Amino acid sequence: MMQITVHFGVIALGLGAAVSVGLLFRMAQIKSLRKQIMELEREKMQDHAEILQLQKQLADFQQSRANLQTPTPVVPLMEKDLGAVDLSKNKRASQ
């Protein structure tokens, strides 16, 4: 039977290289994910600022509308004679 001799230093060097490559790869992933998180948080803050601005505009509009206090005019659909009797009063459409 043939024996293979491997030096302990070669195994340790290979293991160290594998760990180093794995750490570098993982650090690159973490850096990319943190960048995405920061971008999403920035976008979220802009969206919230826009919502607050729109709410402020709505509140200002409602406040100015309340300050006017002009009643909404009621426009009759048909002119009604004061002396005429309403014949359709209390009747169903089928009668």
Image: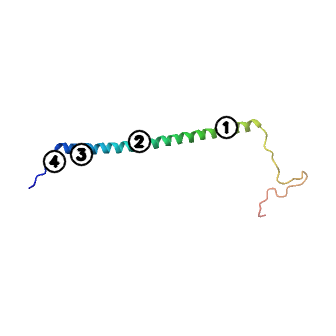
Q: CA distance from mark 3 to mark 1?
A: 67 Å
Marks 4 and 1, the one that precedes in the sequence: 4
| Amino acid type assigned to the residue bearing label 2 in the image | Lys
Q: Residues within 10 Å of mark 2 (few under 14, many from 20)?
A: few
Residue corresponding to mark 1? 59
Q: CA distance from mark 4 to mark 1?
A: 79 Å
| Amino acid type assigned to the residue bearing label 3 in the image | Gly
Nearest the viewer among 78 and 86 is 78
Left or right of residue 71, residue 9 in this image = left
Q: CA distance from mark 2 to mark 1?
A: 42 Å
Residue corresponding to mark 4? 6
Nearest the viewer among 9 and 62 is 9
Marks 2 and 1, the one that precedes in the sequence: 2
Q: Residues within 10 Å of mark 3 (few under 14, many from 20)?
A: few
Q: Which mark is residue 14?
A: 3
Q: Residue at x 48, y 40 (%)?
A: 38
Nearest the viewer among 16 and 35 is 16
Residue corresponding to mark 2? 31
Q: Which mark is residue 94?
A: none
